[in-house]
Image (cartoon, coloured by chain):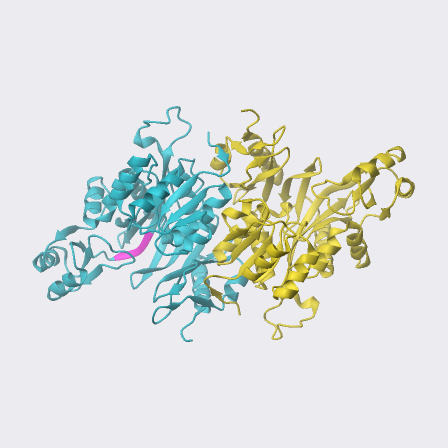
Chain colours: A yellow, B cyan
């Protein structure tokens, strides 16, 4: 049975951006402490965390210090060096969740897709490419356009390049730079995502160690519908406007994905819903995900609370929807890097059911994620279309400083 | 119009207990920073606050340092020395909310009652007492029993002594020690409270300065029903099981109380509902109040978020009930002071709609407030009686360490 003392258990987090900050916000009421490691002094998570260790994400001495102060290590960025984390974990005995091997699998998109395909998860047709000829051959097989993706290092759409015709193959490959893969372009009806969480083995079982994998406690949140623009998430709409059949399918795929993932924690599973109502895997993030921020107000427990519970081996919380909810990102609407400033927030503050989240970044950059707004219906009988329209209005009502 | 930068506005709080901690938890998502002043190193609020200044509550140098770092000063304990705060505020130009004069009024219960009575707030009959003869005279006038109260310094029922008969007058007065008052004993149907908040003048008005008092934005949360035992709050039930007439009356009294209070912030207004359905004022706390903790999950914005908004002069948030909610305190169930430890929290963690709050106190003492549990109905059609029963079960399911 779980026991709380003061100080409570400590989670050491590699990365101290907004995900680390919201993790610390969710952890505090439960008496769980968070220490983050991040190279930027006074990173977003520093305000709420117990402490920040200022060090590069792969700094072995820094991670060793983090491990010494923590009961469990986790990460909120995919740049974390898994070799270092694994080595430090072995030396110090502080476990890492999710397992570094899972991150390694996810890190290389072609390895990720192969493992998932082997496990029966539906993925769009894909192949590795070495040169422009390979890209052209893929176009022959899949039809144009195809999606060219850097195998590693891409996020928020960076490293993803649609190739419209064979003539563009060479240029596209050059722009990606490094190992690449090609995916058949999915003509989707909508993009959806499932925030899924894998916890410890059911605590009710007598044998807490060596429990078979399929005894791990898992949970999935209601499916969100994601609106992207310039490959960056703009809004998440919950519940997604998918049929019940498609929704069930998405949950089933998410559970299959969890079977492949090793170690505990939250996974953001991005999916395509095709025009035929099929579900295909797009990407996986082995951490709380932007498309799950709505859970803070919209679900019984947030994805951040679930991540904290999961990595500590605590029982998972309820993933139930509290009420229909739309999340809209506040992206830097500036021409070039400048001091972050969000003006005219009064309408957001005054709107019942609206919640503002400011990430505490000092600098705004074009399209940088600076915060988000959640709008929940509460007991109001509002359609998600209506909520979406109102959330967009709120997002448009704020101003970013565009001149001195 | 309100603008956010990084770092955001800073609230300097005298006191760093659980109220300061929950204030910091509510402030963080909005980009609001909190610095607390508290003599206990690593006080409960320290985990979440930007910083703690370790100093006594009336330490002028410490409060000056706090003022220098803050955009506004407030307090979460009534022990704050109002003279010092007022002097520092005048020197530094950092405003204090609520106004020190309000705290002074509230501090002396007889001054408080006189001012409120003069403003038309219904209060039980009361009078100051100097000696045992005065107490006996009060018993003649009001009938036995009467409630003898220390005029200053009491909280959680400390300093309140029921006097059953004239023979007990002298002993009772001795146990109170110091200036005292007597109140007629109210034979109440139930104890209720209203969490009320007073904000800045409506922002829509063109004149932001020198706005008449009645233009101040105010808001009241739904009424809570409080269950006390040994004079300490055990549970708050929302909505209270009062009739609509009584509920309206309680809100009206709360608004009248706000008229008397100077300066912005949250007020916990404790009321008696008499068997005849009248509302009488019991006590006022010029700060977020234990009987308002349910607002964290149960209302659109919490009392802590409202306090942060109010003292900064931001627009107030919605006070709407999200769903029926019961809050139950976790009080130190120990025989003597020892290290705080809360065992068997799994049932709370596993119950949908239940939320655990642990205050991060290092030491448990008999009946000390160590945390609380909130149970919300969500979309479940549960009666408050049912919620109360289940919340009590959850409270009973945890264990405090009673032996080594």
Q: Horizontal placement of A203 versus A245: left or right?
A: left
Seen from the viewer's position, the closer of residues A33 and B108 is A33
Please identify the quarter of the rendering in which residue A104 is found.
bottom right
**Rendering coords of residue B350 (x, y %):** 54, 63
Residue shown at the point (30%, 31%) measured from the top left? B213
Look at the picture and state if A58 lies above or below A184.
below
Q: What stretch is highlighted in magenta?
A: B188-192
Q: Does the magenta stretch include residue B190?
A: yes
Q: Is residue A389 left or right of residue A168?
A: left
Tell which of A77 and A238 is nearer to you: A77
Residue B262 falls in image quadrant: top left
Q: Residue furthest front?
A: A61
Does residue A342 appear to the left or right of A101 in the view shown?
left
Answer above or below: position of A178 versus B234. above
* Residue B320 among those drawn in magenta: no
Q: Residue furthest left?
A: B133
Asked whether B354 or B66 is in front, the reply is B66
């Amino acid at each position: 049975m779980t026991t709380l003392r003061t100080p409570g258990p400590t989670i050491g987090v590699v990365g101290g951006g907004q995900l680390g900050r919201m993790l610390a916000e969710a952890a505090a009421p439960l008496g769980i402490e968070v220490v983050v490691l991040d190279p930027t002094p006074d990173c977003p998570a520093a305000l709420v965390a117990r402490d920040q260790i200022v060090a590069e994400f792969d700094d072995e001495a820094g991670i060793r210090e983090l491990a010494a102060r923590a009961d469990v290590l986790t990460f909120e960025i995919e740049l974390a060096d898994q070799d270092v984390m694994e080595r430090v974990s072995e030396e110090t005995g502080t476990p890492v969740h999710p397992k570094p091997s899972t991150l390694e699998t996810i890190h290389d998109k072609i390895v990720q897709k192969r493992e998932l395909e082997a496990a029966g998860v539906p993925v769009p047709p894909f192949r590795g490419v070495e040169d422009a000829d390979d890209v052209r051959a893929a176009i022959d097989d899949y039809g144009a356009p195809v999606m060219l993706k850097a195998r590693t290092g891409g996020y928020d759409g960076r490293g993803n390049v649609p190739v419209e015709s064979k003539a563009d193959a060479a240029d596209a490959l050059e722009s990606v730079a490094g190992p690449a893969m090609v995916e058949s372009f999915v003509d989707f009806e909508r993009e959806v995502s499932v925030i899924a969480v894998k916890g410890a083995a059911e605590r009710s079982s007598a044998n807490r160690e060596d429990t078979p994998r399929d005894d791990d406690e898992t949970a999935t949140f209601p499916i969100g519908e994601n609106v992207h623009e310039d490959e960056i998430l703009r809004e998440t709409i919950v519940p997604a406007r998918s049929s019940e059949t498609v929704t069930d399918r998405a949950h089933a795929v998410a559970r299959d994905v969890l079977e492949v993932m090793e170690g505990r924690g939250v996974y953001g599973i991005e999916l395509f819903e095709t025009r035929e109502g099929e579900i295909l895997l797009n990407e996986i993030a082995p951490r709380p995900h932007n498309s799950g921020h709505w859970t803070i107000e919209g679900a019984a427990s947030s994805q951040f609370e679930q991540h904290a519970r999961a990595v500590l081996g605590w029982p998972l919380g309820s993933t139930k929807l509290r009420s229909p909810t739309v999340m809209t990102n506040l992206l830097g609407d500036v021409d070039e890097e400048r001091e972050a400033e969000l003006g005219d927030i009064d309408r957001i503050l005054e709107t019942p059911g609206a919640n503002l989240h400011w990430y505490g970044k000092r600098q705004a950059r074009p399209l940088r994620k600076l915060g988000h707004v959640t709008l929940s219906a509460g007991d109001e009988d509002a359609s998600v279309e209506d909520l979406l329209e109102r959330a967009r209005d709120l997002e448009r009502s704020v101003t970013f400083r565009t001149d001195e």
